[in-house]
Image (cartoon, grey):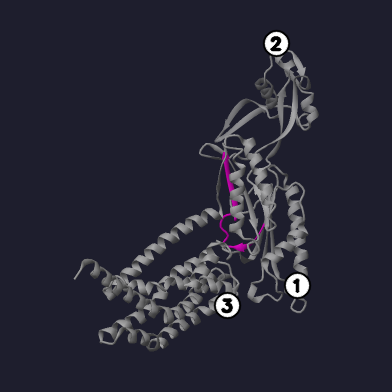
Amino acid sequence: MAILIVVFSVVFSGWTRFVFFPRVPSETVRVNLTMPAGTAFHITDNAIEHIVTQAVTLQEKYRDQASGKSLIRNILSTTGSSGGSSAGQTNKGRVLLELEPPETRLIAIKSTELVKEWRKMIGPIAGMESLTMRAEIGRGGSPIDVQLTGQEFSKLKQVAASIKEKLSEFPAVFDIEDSLSRGKQELQLQIKPEAQALGLNLTDLARQVRQAFFGYEVQRILRGRDDVRVYIRYPEEERNSLYNLDSMLIRTADGAEIPFIEVADLVASQSPSRITRIDQRRSLSITADLDKQKANIEAIKRDVTQFMDELLLRFPTIRYTIEGEAKEQRQSFQGLKSGLVLVLFVIYGLLAIPFRSYWQPLIVMSMIPFGAVGAVAGHWLMGKPLTIMSLMGMLALTGVVVNDSLVLVDFINRKRREGIQLSVAVSQAGVARFRAVVLTSLTTFAGLAPLIFEKSTQAQFLIPMAISLGFGIMFATICTLVLLPVNYLLFIRSGQILKSFLRNENGP
């Protein structure tokens, strides 16, 4: 019981690392580059070419001289798309590296280490919005994803800047980004007071500038199924520089023509490429990645949550939620809790029917927590953090652990029906059923051992579940042989004491 309390305390206090979804090194490295909206194709292509050049250098560095095989099998680059629905966007590009599988690599290096080295070789790219590098499979949402909503966008940007500054304080956190795109560069027109005195307003000014540079539709011609639109606008040589705009003549209401520079000013700015709202409130997300091998993600989320609670005291109109991987974790935990309650109820019912008792199923089920202790100890021994798959393994373990306990309790019940004393039946149970219990557990662990020690990429997801099952059932077996007979005696004697107490209360 002391071991049970200590282990559970270590887990729930945060001393044992929990990673909702572990980083499984992939055999493919993905790099996505995003430049500001409207970036010319050749500028994005030059940046992609630089990334590919560094990949080729890395490919030659990790080439085995004896066999001539490189760790990097193939390199694929695409400009104008980053996969999915982003085709035709000249500001995006992608580079993929195909790596040798871990079990056949001649050079021992992890995909994550290769990515770190490649990132340093690439260095900063002028003007880029983001450069993400992924070398894992099964990735869900971002490990850190803070979603802000509010009415005043300026305050959202201010809060987002504070959050990004806070996240940069954690050494293991990187790729800190926000959903606010830099957008396209634009020139905003600001009308001068002198123009208003002449009867001009901003609408008239903008309409005349649009007609001059974009064109004024004067006619539509139908040619078969085609709709041909005829526009009048300045010649191309008179609309390709700011000088042409400054020297443009603006017509007033009385027909006078005044140079543009006399009635308006140009202000350079950037407009967002997209606007996102949630429940009619402007929204902005701050995302970040982190090194799950070094960082305690739960501790970081607690620090970020505490920081947000203190920060938003100064911005009461702004709300925040933790999204991404944290949201998936909450949903998964809710499902696991419901599943655990259902499993325990079903196990109790299935045991109560053959035992014809309400309390004997509790003796059998008392071994379930010790299976979880063995599962946690197995993760310590193998140097693995607890994951969502570990918890699913513990959930499956609840049904496996009761098998050995069921064998012992059934043996004790049969001996008691034969007239053997309780203490003798309990003491004989572990000896008589030792071989059956131990062989059952050993064969189960032996069947799981190849999966626990498997090195292939495809098996990495299932290893935490196999550890929970294998080590959990081994530790629960030891507890079953020693502790279950004790629990049986405690239940019987507690019942006898309770009956004696009730008899004395009710009188002879």
Q: Callout 1: helix, strand or loop?
A: loop
Out of 73 and 234, give the one closest to the viewer.
73
Q: Quadrant of residue 284?
A: top right
Q: Is residue 502 magenta?
A: no
Q: Amino acid at mark 1?
A: Arg
| Mark 2 or 3, nearer chain start | 2
Return the x and y of residue 92 as percentages of the image width and height.
Answer: 68, 49
Q: Could you say where residue 416 lies in the image, as x and y percent from the top left?
A: 28, 84
Circle 2 Cα neighbour tier, 10 Å, few/some/many (<14 / 14–19 / ≥20): few
Q: Which residues are magenta?
A: 133-149
Q: Which mark is residue 453?
A: 3
The residue positioned 70% from the left and 76% from the top of the image is 106
Q: Position of residue 129 (x, y in %)?
A: 70, 47
Residue 229 can be seen, yes or no:
yes
Mark toward the viewer: 2 or 1:
1
Q: Quadrant of residue 214?
A: top right
Q: Give residue 254's mark.
A: 2
